[in-house]
Each structure stands twice: as structure tokens, then as C-alpha cells.
Image (spheres, helix red, strand yellow):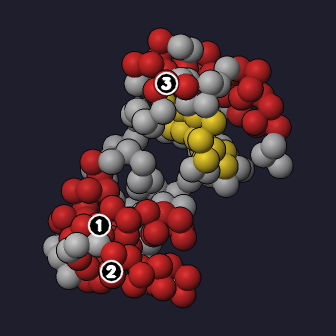
């Protein structure tokens, strides 16, 4: 697994695009405190960029009016936040108990063979990235895979093959 304590700087200032900016302002009216916007704010950054860079964390801290260290703590704790650029198709395979017991390894082995990368890697053409993540919260329908944030449940190698075929 990649080192989640290392931040990547792009050298370019970050800001929300108009759509995310409007969504952030809408969320401000719905959440009880500005600090409770840390997780949804990080999610908006990831929706926009596919990952969360150091500049985006600093931007979110400014927008919320909190310390950048609080954004960093949340972003590095939750594995759902990508801390480095991902492939066009980002595949997350849950590795926690239910998924482990019900065959996540066969899915990971198939993906390693088929797309030629191990968890934590990006394919050389930038098309795929693969990650093993902690429980995705759908344990009753394990094994669970996310493709670009969409859930796919009761997975097996055959279903993974069919899902991969949709990645054009
Ligand atoms: S253990 Fe995989 S979704 Fe919970």
C-alpha cells in the first residue's frame, strides 16, 4: 500500500470549479459547523480532480477556516481519499474480513494478471489504477469492488471481467 503520510504538491494553486463551489456553499448551509465540512469538502476535491493534492488541502482549510493539519489528518486517515493521481479507471477492492473470506484475493489476482499492476500502482498508460481498501460498508454483499466510486457487489472473477470490459 502506498505511503499515506506523503503529500504531493503540484505547484499549482487549487480552487473549486463553479459547480463544486456552489455545492460547497450549499453544504455550508446544511452542516452544523464549518469543521464538519472537512470530509464532504475533501470529497468535492476528489470528485473534481480524482485525487487530493497538498494545495487542495490548504485551499479547503482556508475555505473552512481551520488548520491545514486538520484537513491533512482526515485525508490521510480515510483510505477513500486518493493522495496521488489515479488512473482514468480507478479500481478499489475491499480487503476487509467479509470480502477477504469471500474471495477478494481471486479478484485482485485476476486484475494483477489482466491489467498488469499490483495494488498501489498505476498502469504505464495511465488507464488503470488499483488499490486494496478497508471495509466499504457493504459487507452483506461481499466481495465489493468500486470502479471510479461506483459500487459493484457480490463480485467474482467473471463479474470483474465483465466490468473491466466496460472500461474503454
Ligand atoms: S468487508 Fe468488504 S465491504 Fe465490508
- Give the residue drawn at x 62%, y 24%: 154
Q: Earlier in the sequence, mark 3 or mark 1?
A: 1
Query: Element type at marker 3?
Result: helix
CA distance for labels 3 and 1: 29 Å
Q: Quadrant of residue 29?
A: bottom left
CB-based contact (under 8 Å), mark 3 and mark 2? no
CA distance for labels 3 and 2: 34 Å
The local crowd at label 1, few if under 14, some if 14 to 19, many if 20 or more residues have their Cα within 10 Å, is many
Answer above or below: position of 106 versus 116: above
Of residue 115 and residue 20, the one placed in the foreground of this image is 20
CA distance for labels 1 and 2: 11 Å
User: CB at mark 2 closer than 8 A to ligand 1?
Assistant: no
Of residue 139 and residue 89, the one placed in the foreground of this image is 139
User: What number is the disc on residue 38?
Assistant: 1
Residue position for label 2: 28
Q: Earlier in the sequence, mark 3 or mark 2?
A: 2
Of residue 41 and residue 4, the one placed in the foreground of this image is 41
Query: Element type at marker 1?
Result: helix
Residue 9 visible? The answer is no
Q: Position of residue 8 (x, y in %)?
A: 38, 62
Q: Is residue 4 left or right of residue 104?
A: left
CB-based contact (under 8 Å), mark 3 and mark 1? no
User: What number is the disc on residue 23?
Assistant: none
Q: Position of residue 31 (x, y in %)?
A: 29, 72
- Give the residue drawn at x 83%, y 49%: 168
- Give the residue drawn at x 33%, y 61%: 39
Residue position for label 3: 140
Q: Quadrant of residue 151?
A: top right
Q: Position of residue 71 (x, y in %)?
A: 25, 65
Query: Can you tell which of label 1 and label 2 is closer to the viewer?
Result: 2
Q: Earlier in the sequence, mark 1 or mark 2?
A: 2
Amino acid at each position: 500500500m502506498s505511503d499515506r503520510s506523503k503529500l504531493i504538491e503540484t505547484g499549482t494553486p487549487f480552487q473549486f470549479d463553479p459547480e463544486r463551489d456552489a455545492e460547497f456553499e450549499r453544504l455550508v448551509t446544511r452542516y452544523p459547523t464549518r469543521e464538519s465540512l472537512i470530509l464532504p469538502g475533501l470529497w468535492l476535491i476528489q470528485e473534481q480532480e480524482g485525487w487530493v493534492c497538498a494545495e487542495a488541502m490548504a485551499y479547503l482549510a482556508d475555505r473552512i477556516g481551520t488548520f491545514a493539519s486538520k484537513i491533512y489528518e482526515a485525508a490521510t486517515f480515510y483510505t477513500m481519499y486518493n493522495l496521488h493521481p489515479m488512473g482514468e479507471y480507478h479500481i478499489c477492492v475491499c480487503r476487509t474480513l467479509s470480502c477477504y473470506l469471500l474471495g477478494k484475493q481471486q479478484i485482485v489476482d485476476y486484475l494483477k494478471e489482466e491489467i498488469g499492476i499490483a495494488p498501489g500502482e498505476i498502469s504505464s498508460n495511465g488507464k488503470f489504477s488499483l488499490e486494496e481498501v478497508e471495509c466499504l460498508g457493504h459487507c452483506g454483499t461481499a466481495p465489493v469492488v468500486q470502479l471510479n466510486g461506483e459500487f459493484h457487489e457480490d463480485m467474482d472473477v467473471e463479474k470483474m471481467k465483465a466490468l473491466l470490459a466496460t472500461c474503454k
